[in-house]
Image (cartoon, grey):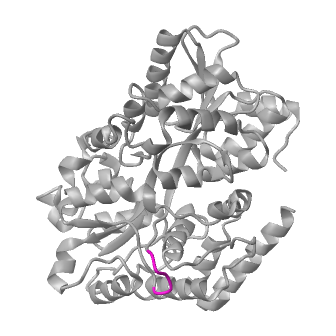
Amino acid sequence: MWRLSSLAVALLLFGTGLAGCTAGRGQDDALVVWSLENQTDRVRATERILDRFTQQTGVAVRLVAVDENQFSQMIMSAAAAGRPPDVIGALPLTATWQLAGNELLDTGASQEIVDRLGASTFSSRALRLTRDGDRQLAVPSDGWAQILVYRKDLFAAAGLGTPDTYDRIRQAARVLNHDGMAGISIATSANDAATGQAFEGLATGNGCELVDGSGRIALDDGRCHSTFRFVEELITSYSPPGAQDLDSTRATYLAGRSAMIMWSSYLLDELGGLRSDAMPSCPQCQADPGFLAANSGVVGAIKGPDSDTAAQYGELTSWTVQVGAKRAEAVRLVEYMMGEQAYPEWLGMAPEGKIPVRRGTVTDPRRFTDAWEKMPAGVDSKRPLGEIYPPQTMRELRDSPDRFRRWGFDHRQGVLMGATLSEMPVGKAVESMLSGTRPDEAAGQAAADVRAIQTSLR
């Protein structure tokens, strides 16, 4: 359904948000690299890295910055026209598996790169999430972690334990939900991807799966019913009223009006006062801008009552080499981007959201993680996260990729996950509970919607 005509390809490539720029000599036969890091400062940083690659190798590179929301149409259209890029960077898991399902990835090249760099230098979990049977779909690079951030000062005063299980989260939300303070802020808007991400993070920690190993939709199984009931209690009894989204949940926590929040690790630079358009505004923050950062704890993996192990949601981005690419040059470029010269600079574009999954080299296994902790984070102000947060928080972030659990990918259902991402059946089910839909009914409706999506893909 994504395949368009050659005319549409031309319109998409030249009439939308793709921004192209050339590193090096700019010949017509330059290596074409698409990057989903399309913010202006990150495009410029990527250009600098690619310029050095060209200077060292003589390989000209043309960089094309692509908006993530347009990527699926762009790549399928370019492939249909016989003009795919040679390399793609910052590619999320869902998009990686979509390309694999359409046989657009040179998986042999990805395996070759991982072997040359050393598989032992990568997070084993990251390699597994980007692997389909015996095919290494992509070279995993970095990711952001979903975290539960909580007010350590309020927890200590109330004698509450770390909120790393359903029971402890529920107890803390109940105890601290009073006097203008919400117990917890979670995205609940049906149209916000953060709603599904928050639910999935809680669900995987309870052993709830969207689809099982046989391809059966499992959202209406007992463990998922338990998760829906837990989320319904949190959002209707201990959260701000009305549908919440990414911006409103963040604003509530930064204002000191929420005891807990589920957000991505991108929140950490904002808590530290490093972004002027999202500064901490709590009453204590007027005298001490660092108050919230100093008094916030971070939980990564969460465990539900129906599971033996805790789990954590996270997004993993990768480098891929496309079928039909200038293979030797493409492999050389990806190796360079994941190597000692370029990889730290790539991570440094936004270290709060670029947690390395290649931890070091064969001879120096912690080279990149140690460098990452010292990288300046932030937008309007810059400061290493390791100077703002304690070692325990940095360990939670550093080790989080090993705990990433994502629906579908372990069961080779990446294409289905991509389709559900655009339809957002879980987000719709979560928001419906705000208006009185019972949790079991919400679970049943979400399962029915996903089954319909699954049928449409056959």
Task: Give the residue displayed 47% in from the left and 11% down from the top.
Answer: 56
In the rendered structure, which segment of residues is drawn in magenta?
A: 305-309
Task: Give the residue displayed 59% in from the left and 13% down from the top.
Answer: 60
Seen in the image, is 224 located left or right of residue 399? right
Q: Quadrant of residue 154?
A: bottom left
Task: Give the residue displayed 68% in from the left and 24% down from the top.
Answer: 327
* Residue 129 seen: yes
- Across and down, in percent, residue 107 comes to 68, 39
Query: Is 58 above or below relative to 297?
Result: above
The secondary structure that most of the magenta stretch takes on is loop
Seen in the image, is 9 located left or right of residue 190? right
* Residue 437 seen: no
For the image, the number of numbered tags is 0
Front residue of this view, candidates 319 and 74: 319
Q: Is residue 360 magenta?
A: no
Query: Is 215 above or below relative to 280?
Result: below
- Across and down, in percent, residue 318 comes to 56, 42
Query: Is 443 above or below relative to 283?
Result: below
Query: Is 47 above or below relative to 399?
Result: above
Task: Give the residue displayed 49% in from the left and 52% down from the top.
Answer: 124
Q: Quadrant of residue 191?
A: bottom right
- Across and down, in percent, residue 27 comes to 65, 9
- Across and down, in percent, residue 442 comes to 65, 84
